[in-house]
Image (cartoon, rainbow, N blue to C red):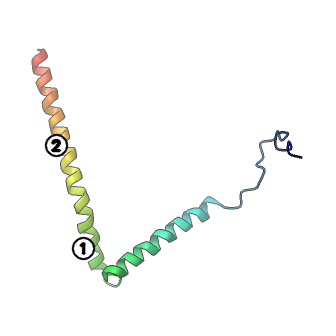
Amino acid sequence: MSNTLYKLTTSEPILPQTRSKKKLFGRIRSFFAKKYQGLNEWFGIEECKSDRIWYYGTLSLMFFLPAATYVISKLRFCCKVYKKNRMVSK
């Protein structure tokens, strides 16, 4: 009886999967929706859409501006190094 799993040669799963991916994504979405509503309630911005736009817009700028500055500075540095190496090799 303990060797029955070794004798299975078909590609069928031993235990059927009962959860669908649609339900899984629905659960994940509802989890984040509850957290989003809780955060809005905590800050007192659950009723006014313009307050949410201001709050989340400011929050996104806090992350976007340093990231954009970093990327732009790296691109400029790489261009300068490339031009310098091209001039030296001529």
Mark 1: give few (<14), some (14-19) or many (20+) Cα within 10 Å. Answer: few
Work out whether 80 lies above or below 16.
Answer: above
Marks 2 and 1, how far apart at CA: 28 Å
Residue that lies at the very extreme toward the top in this rendered image:
90
Q: Amino acid at mark 1?
A: Trp
Q: Quadrant for the C terminus, please.
A: top left
Disc on the earlier residue, 2 or 1: 1
Callout 1: SS: helix
Callout 2: SS:
helix
Name the residue: 18% across, 49% down. Answer: 69
Residue corresponding to mark 1: 54
Give the image location of residue 15, x and y in percent.
Answer: 77, 54
Query: Splitting the image into 4 quarters, where does residue 50 fall?
Result: bottom left
Is 56 on the left or on the right of 22, as rendered?
Answer: left
Q: Is residue 9 left or right of residue 85?
A: right
Of all residues, the one furthest to the right in this rendering is: 1
The answer to which of 8 and 33 lies nearer the viewer is 8
Q: Which mark is residue 74?
A: none
| Three-letter residue code for mark 2 | Ser
Q: Quadrant of residue 84?
A: top left
Residue closer to the observer: 22 or 2: 2
Q: Where does the image place residue 37, in percent across and percent down from the top left?
A: 41, 77
Which residue was labeled with disc 2? 73
Total marks in image: 2
Is 76 drawn above or below residue 84 in the view shown? below
The residue located at (65%, 60%) in the rendering is 20
User: How many other residues sit within 10 Å of disc 2, few (<14), some (14-19) or many (≥20)?
Assistant: few
Where residue 21 sits: x, y (%)? Answer: 61, 59
Residue at the spot 24% in from the left edge and 73% down from the top edge? 54
Give residue 66's quadrant in the image. bottom left
Foreground of the two, 75 or 39: 39
